[in-house]
Structures are given as C-alpha cells and as structure tokens.
Image: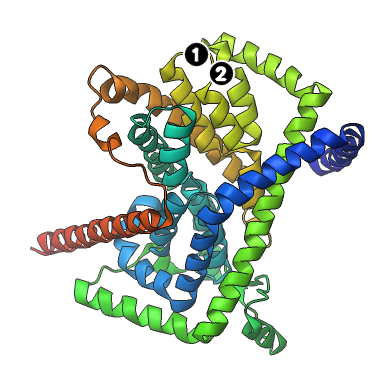
Amino acid sequence: MIKKIGTPLLIAGLAGCMLLILLYPEASLDAALRGLAVWWDVLFPSLFPFFVLSELMLGFGIVHLFGALLDPLMRPLFRIPGCGGFVMAMGYVSGYPVGARLTAKLREQGQLTRIEGERLVAFTTSSDPIFLLGAVSVGFFHNAALGPYLALSHYGSGLILGLLLSFYGRKEERRLAGAGKKRPKVPTRPGPLDPDRPEQTRERGAGLEPAVPDTPTPAADMRVPVPGKVRLRTALASMAEARRKDGRSLGELLKGAIESSLRLIMVVGGLVVFFTMLMELMDRAGILGLLLTAAGHVLAALGFPAGLTEALTSGFFEVTVGVKAAGSAAAALPFKAAAAAFILSWGGLSVHAQVASIWNGTGLRYLPFMAARLIHAVLSAVLALLLWRPMMGSAPALAPLAAGRPVQSIPSGLALLGLVLGAMLLLSLAAAAASRIGRLYKGR
C-alpha cells in the first residue's frame, strides 16, 4: 500500500521540482553553486582523506586487528562485534557519512549481521569535531565555550543511543539463531560486487559468492574470554588473514581506495547540491513558508521559542543551513544551543540520503535508521538543556577546554582518532581483565 502511494507521490514531486527549475532557473543555479561551494570548501577536504584512510585500513586488515582487541568492550555494551569499535571511533572523529561507509564495507565482508549493522550505523552517524568545534561554535555562534558543551551533548547522547540499541532486534536474532540450529548449513545471499575487487568477479564466476550472512553464529553471543596475550595473537592473526584474503599490492590498494573514495565524495557532493537547490525552490514556491508556519505552531504548543522555527525547518533538510540559522535565531542561547544539538544529531535529509546511497545492496533498512536519528536528536536536545546550568552557567565547568585553538585540521583529526582508539583499547583491556577476575572469583 505504501509503495503504491509512494511511487506516484515521488513522480509528482520530481515533476514539481523540474517545473520549479524551469520557472526559477537563475535561483536554481545560484543555489546549486552555493551547495557546490560548501562541498568543495568544507566537505571534500575534510571527508576525502578519511575515506581513503578507511579503505586502506580495511585492505591492510587493521580494522580486523582492532575488532579482535575491542570485542570485550563492544559486545557486552552494544551487542556488536569488536570491529564496530573502530567504526565508532572513525565515525565520531570523521563525521557523517564515514561510519555508514565502514559499516557497509564490513557488512559486505560478512563481519556484521543485518541487525548488528543497523545498530552500528544508527549511533555512529554523527558530526565531526572539526565542524562542531570550529564552524558551529566559533563560526555560527561566535562562542568557543559552546564547543565542549555541544560535543558532550552530541556524542554523549550518541553513546546513550548505542546502549539503548543493544536491545533492538534481539527477538529477530533469537529467531534467526534458532533457524540456524535447525539447518545443517546456513544459507547466505550474495553481496554486491565491488569494482575495486576483481577477485570477487573471479570467485562469483567459480560459484563462490561473496556472502553477507544474516544469521548470527553461535560464537557471536557465546564468545569465551581469553587472556590478553592470546587475544593479541588472535588479533594479529586476524589482521594477517584479512590482508592475505585481500591480496592486492600497495599500489593496487591505494588506487582502489582513491577511486572508490572519489566516487563516494562525488555522491555526497551531488546530494548536497540537490538539497540546497531543493530548499531554495521550496522557498520560492512558498512551500517552505507553509512548513515554517506549521513548525511555529508546534513549537509554541510545546513551549519553545518561535524564533527557532526557521532553524529546525531548515535543519530537517540540511544540517549546515539549519545550524547556521540556529546561531542567528531570535531566542535565548540555551534554546539555540539545544536546537543546534537537535539538528546535528538528526543530520538532515541530505545526510540520510547519503547514508542510504552508501549502504544500497547491503540489506540494511532505512526506517530503523530514521527512528534512531530522531531519538538521537531528542536525547541530544534534552541533554543539552540539562547540561546548560552546570557547564555554561556563571562558572562554566569546561570553559578552560575552550580557551585553546579548536580542532580545525586533518592532522588534529588524526591525532584525535588515535586518542579515541587508545582510550577504547584501554577500556577493552579493563573489561577483559574484569571478566577474567570475575571468572576466577566464581571458580573459587
């Protein structure tokens, strides 16, 4: 029923967009150029290096190394394999849509089930510190002290969401696990061919399909803890095995990483240009004005300032435009900051479209992702309001952290990635040690 209604509506919407482009060609061109400038000046230099880096790390097996080391932390807390810890670190440091890209790659390699992939991409899709601490706090709000405050609201609510999502899909996992026990062999479905992986074509021609399993293995939920030395050897062996299976030389790996990253960054740029132009056309046609009026009534009914209407409506479509409007909105600063936290966590339909295009063919579903984005946005806004008095009152608790220079370069982002991974490894080591101590205590 939804598909029968949705297809005609989509066709009518596209026809309406084409008509508006013909009616307002100059405005369409100006909006497209603005979107192109945002992509070239901001997104390309900040995302492209991390796209290439993530591809290289997958090819060298580094993701598998961290996966084995982080398993004691990620599986009990978030019910995802240890490789999700690396995705979480890269997603939080690099910003959307890097987390979705890595999740799709791991899904194609059979490292994640569908439920695990949906959990992982839901709470690792976030803004990057370069944008949050630099562009948002300093550029849009002209207040560097907001940086740590917004970061804690945004990333803290993301971790809370990850913990909540550990309860998502358990019933389906039990059903699939039960079905797997009844069958002597677990069927798998073929994953999408990667043009940068010619060996997949050879495997498929020989009848060996690159599989994307949906049935969790018994080891996924009943993994026996092992001592630290054994875990390190297992992690190194996993990395070596992943490198052997990849089989590409350094030159081929670098060439494939750059080519696939360029294709992805072009998709991201095209979606940014499209949504920037779409918002301009909606404004010219008066549709955006109707949405602003409706959103104003909703905000007034909920007791929020009506000055946030433009920010929230714009942020529903595009995160940068929405956050910029929140910085100049006619409202008290706590509400403006909460609105910015909401928009950053929602991500905008532009980011949603980027994520959906990235995981096409992996079997991951959009509706759980959209619901998780909405929950993340609400949690982030509520946490921002709760943290305002202790952090941004008369004596801001984290004001000294904002006194330094905000993160605004790729080397700073890589240093931050190293710090995050190091902290996660220490936490994983502590979790493994605590588990071992608990087993020894029970043995007595």
Q: Which element carries disc 2, helix, strand or loop?
A: helix
Residue at image position (26%, 23%) is 390
User: In the drawing, does residue 418 fall left or right of residue 226?
Assistant: right
Name the residue tied to disc 1: 331
Residue 275 versus residue 49: which sits nearer the camera? Answer: 49
Residue at image position (22%, 21%) is 395
Can residue 365 be seen here? The reply is no
Q: Which element carries disc 1, helix, strand or loop?
A: loop
Can residue 293 be seen here? The reply is yes
Q: Residue 233: x and y, percent?
A: 27, 80
Q: Residues within 10 Å of mark 2 (few under 14, many from 20)?
A: many
Q: Is residue 413 above or below residue 327?
A: below
Residue at image position (13%, 61%) is 437
Name the residue tied to disc 2: 308
Q: Residue 370: x and y, percent?
A: 60, 40
Residue 64 versus residue 324: which sits nearer the camera? Answer: 324
Residue at image position (49%, 13%) is 331
Q: Amino acid at mark 1?
A: Ala
Quarter that holds the C terminus: bottom left
Q: Residue furthest left?
A: 444
Q: Are marks 1 and 2 in contact (CB under 8 Å)?
A: yes
Q: Residues within 10 Å of mark 1 (few under 14, many from 20)?
A: some
* Badge number at residue 44: none
Q: Residue 153: x and y, percent?
A: 38, 33
Q: Amino acid at mark 2?
A: Leu
